[in-house]
Amino acid sequence: MTAAVFRSPSIIHYGAGALEQLGPTARELGLRHVLLVTDAGMVQLGTAGKAQQLLEAADVRTTIFDGVQPDPTLANVEAGLALLRQDTCDGIVAVGGGSPIDCAKAIAVRHTHPQPLPEFAGVEQFPLPGLPVIAVPTTAGTGSEVTRVMVITDTERDVKMMFASRYCLAAAAIVDPLLTLGMPKGLTAAVGVDALTHAIEAYVSRRAQPQTDLLALSAIRLISHNLRTAYHDGSNLEARSAVMLGAMQAGLAFSNASVALVHGMARPLGACFHLTHGISIAVLLPAVTEFSVGAAPERYARIAVEMGESDIVSALRNLNRDVNIPSLRGLKVPEDRYRALQGKMATDALASGSPANNPRLASASEIVELYQKVYAEGA
Ligand SMILES: NC(=O)c1ccc[n+]([C@@H]2O[C@H](COP(=O)([O-])OP(=O)(O)OC[C@H]3O[C@@H](n4cnc5c(N)ncnc54)[C@H](O)[C@@H]3O)[C@@H](O)[C@H]2O)c1
Ligand SMILES: [Fe+2]
């Protein structure tokens, strides 16, 4: 066996009711005044308020920053940082989907690095640790609560910057499926297929390792067997719990084994057409898998077995259909602009580095062909 490293947060509370551990966890980490990073949706749903109560009950002061946009921007990070410094917070609690969690992780490392964030894009570019982050996910999707990855959008260049660093790992994750019961159907579907994609890409990645294989296969099983129920019957706690555990395991897997071509192609697609991360992933997954399957037939066959299916590509198409993932045309992505931007998207995809982990390496022109094929699928 070749040598490998596996990194994860040192504390993970998970399962229904895990949120109750928020206050004690902040105390365990020695925090006295945290910046609570969240978004308007979480404030409206009362989840941010609940987290604030639990922290204050444990004698941890809070300053709320609820200005995170879906797909957080550099400006969101700087606004949160200013508030953190103004109130001299000693740590961060993130409550929300991948957007508040990524923004929190970015604020935490930005605090200890004076240079602009874009200088650290890529793999292991931060020289120093940031402030401790406790991540409380409310979507069962990105796995950001357990990954060393964060994605921040540079709105001036229309680029989703990817940062992967040991210093972008949360200190603690609190993964409570009760927080996902109210997720709307469209969000459940998109983030669920994103999580499944993390597991699939981690399993076929050139950097897969025994420890990530175990988690990826478990995640594939949990998500593929429960996502339809979570989608159609959102209050089903058993299905919600299974999908959320799967999403977390998928996060641990891809954080250590990396994602591949689907993610490489999805980031520029989302940035250019303002599609959510989950949707950009879901529309690409079947066609990109079809492109890759011949390069790792045994691995893809094993994934199909875990899903209880015989053919991986049709299994993925069926799942998308069953949870009503729209097509690019259905999403009103204009064909002329899409064609005009294919070349830029392919260049940005390759530049992110993720496609280099794919079992079948794709050239820029093959990536353009794949983008075309995905558009034509929705015709
Ligand atoms: N760091 C990583 O490892 C990683 C991995 C994949 C994706 N991402 C990033 O994560 C972001 C996407 O995160 P996301 O898909 O979790 O969504 P999100 O955080 O962008 O949230 C989308 C919307 O859903 C709402 N929402 C969240 N939880 C809800 C709930 N339980 N009930 C009702 N509404 C709820 C939010 O208020 C928001 O309006 C993207 O920026 C993507 O690039 C990061
Ligand atoms: Fe993803």
Image: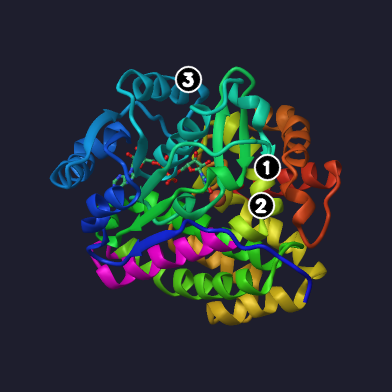
Task: Please identify the quadrant where the N terminus is shown.
Answer: bottom right
Give the image location of residue 234, x and y in percent: 27, 61
Give the image location of residue 50, x and y in percent: 17, 45
Q: Residue at x 52, y 54 (%)?
A: 194
Q: Tell which circle, 1 or 2, labels the residue nearer the N-terminal end.
A: 1
Q: Is residue 50 visible?
A: yes
Q: Identify the disc placed on residue 114.
A: none
The CA distance from mark 2 to mark 3 is 27 Å
In reply to whether residue 238 is colored magenta, the answer given is yes
Is 38 placed left or right of 373 in the picture?
left
Amino acid carrying mark 1 in the image = Glu
The CA distance from mark 1 to mark 2 is 22 Å
Q: Residue at x 57, y 49 (%)?
A: 281
Q: Identify the disc placed on residue 124.
A: 1
Q: Tell which circle, 3 or 1, labels the residue nearer the N-terminal end.
A: 3
Depth check: give the residue in front, 317 or 83.
Answer: 83
Q: Identify the disc placed on residue 75.
A: 3
User: Regarding mark 2 in the picture, which secondary structure is present there?
Assistant: helix
Amino acid carrying mark 2 in the image = Val
Give the image location of residue 146, x and y in percent: 48, 55
Residue 374 vs 40, above or below: the answer is: below
